[in-house]
Image (spheres, grey):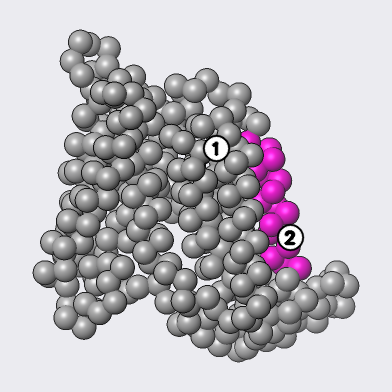
């Protein structure tokens, strides 16, 4: 696997998760309190950095074959989850991810929640609204955990965690910058298509590393990936085509 | 306290296993079979791709039927 594939996979995965996290932070900020929402997001990013800094070196200390078996297996399970959802969305059997709709729902919930009193709760001076803080913190941490998992597993397998971390940070910076610029959910990002690509990549590398870690030898060595990735992609697209025939007509619009 | 532990375990189960536990079980079985076959002279690389070829359509089929 080249550095480019590592970078692109982690970057895309991080981009889609960052878009989802941004939607939650925007709803918490616009509906309640910006300072508390941004403090919550920052605290979650700090927690994620701590997790990556702790687990990263530990992962690189594990022998490569054992790492590939465990990580390959986890990545394959994880990748099949992504791909399953992506295929269902592309075929119209599952509602497509709509950041505008999610934003409206989160915003309404944030506005409806009772206000908190920071003094009576012994709050920090930067946190004037604990609802915003908690909503942002949970959103960023939960979406970020997936990214941390993908970045760490890909980075550790390629013995290049710094590159994976760079891809993750680049995606976060781009999404955060766009979020600050537009102050609205990034509904124009082709999130569903990117999730499809990431699902294909995670599944492909899970197949390759999992089998290799379990002791199998791929014909052609690493070059087998050049067959596995397109094969998984074609297979997934064929499944979408097959499922579309049974999908409700109302959900047929908008494809990938 | 136990409720928090259960919630934590549930979170990790949802995080790793996801919507269809049969897929996770199938992946583990495929890797175990690959390991068993790799100790023989029979090629084992095809087992995991074949498992994906079976597990993904079955999972999608179950989801489509709901």
Above/below status of A41 relative to A149: below
Examine the image and state in which quarter residue A180 appears: bottom right
Q: Is residue A77 visible?
A: no
Examine the image and state in which quarter residue A131 appears: bottom right
Per the rendered image, the range of residues in magenta is: A39-56
Q: Earlier in the sequence, mark 2 or mark 1?
A: 2
Magenta stretch contains residue A54: yes
The residue identified by callout 1 is: A155
Q: Secondary structure at mark 1?
A: helix
Q: Residue at x 46, y 23 (%)?
A: A66
Q: Position of residue B32 (x, y in %)?
A: 29, 26
- Camera-side mark, 2 or 1: 1
Above/below status of B11 relative to B24: below
Which chain does tag 1 point to? Answer: A
Q: Residue at x 54, y 78 (%)?
A: A185
On residue A252, the disc is none
Q: Position of residue B43 (x, y in %)?
A: 20, 19
Other residues around mark 2 within 10 Å, as few (<14) / some (14–19) / many (≥20): some
Q: Is residue B53 visible?
A: yes
Q: CA distance from mark 2 to mark 1?
A: 24 Å
Q: Position of residue A235 (x, y in %)?
A: 20, 50
The residue identified by callout 2 is: A43
Magenta stretch contains residue B3: no
Disc 2 and disc 1 on one polypeptide chain? yes
Q: Position of residue A250 (x, y in %)?
A: 21, 83
Q: Quadrant of the C terminus of chain A?
A: bottom left
Q: Residue at x 19, y 36 (%)?
A: B50
Q: Main secondary structure of the magenta part?
A: helix
Above/below status of A131 relative to B29: below
Cβ atoms under marks 2 and 1 closer than 8 Å: no
């Amino acid at each position: 696997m080249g550095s480019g594939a590592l970078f692109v996979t982690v970057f895309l995965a991080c981009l889609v998760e960052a878009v989802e996290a941004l939607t939650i932070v925007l709803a918490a900020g616009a509906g309640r309190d910006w300072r508390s929402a941004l403090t919550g997001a920052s605290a979650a990013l700090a927690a994620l950095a701590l997790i990556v800094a702790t687990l990263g070196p530990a992962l690189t200390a594990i022998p490569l074959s054992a790492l590939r078996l465990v990580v390959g297996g986890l990545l394959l399970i994880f990748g099949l989850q992504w791909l399953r959802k992506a295929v269902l969305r592309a075929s119209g059997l599952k509602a497509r991810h709509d950041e505008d709709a999610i934003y409206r729902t989160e915003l309404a919930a944030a506005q409806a929640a009772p206000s908190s009193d920071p003094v009576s709760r012994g709050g920090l001076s930067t946190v004037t609204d604990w609802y915003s803080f908690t909503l942002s913190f949970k959103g960023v941490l939960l979406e970020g955990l997936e990214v941390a998992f993908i970045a760490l597993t890909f980075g550790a397998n390629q013995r290049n965690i710094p590159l994976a971390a760079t891809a993750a940070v680049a995606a976060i910076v781009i999404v955060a910058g766009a979020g600050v610029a537009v102050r609205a959910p990034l509904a124009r990002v082709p999130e569903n298509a990117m999730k499809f690509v990431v699902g294909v990549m995670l599944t492909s590398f899970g197949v390759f590393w999992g089998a290799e870690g379990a002791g199998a030898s791929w014909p052609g060595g690493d070059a087998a990936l050049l067959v596995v990735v397109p094969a998984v992609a074609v297979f997934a697209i064929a499944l979408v085509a097959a499922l579309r025939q049974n999908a409700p007509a109302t959900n047929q619009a908008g494809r990938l | 306290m136990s409720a928090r532990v259960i919630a934590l375990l549930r979170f990790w189960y949802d995080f790793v296993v996801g919507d269809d536990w049969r897929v996770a079980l199938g992946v583990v079985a495929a890797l175990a079979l690959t390991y068993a076959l790799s100790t023989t002279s029979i090629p084992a690389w095809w087992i995991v791709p074949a498992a994906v070829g079976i597990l993904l359509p079955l999972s999608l089929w179950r989801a489509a039927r709901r």
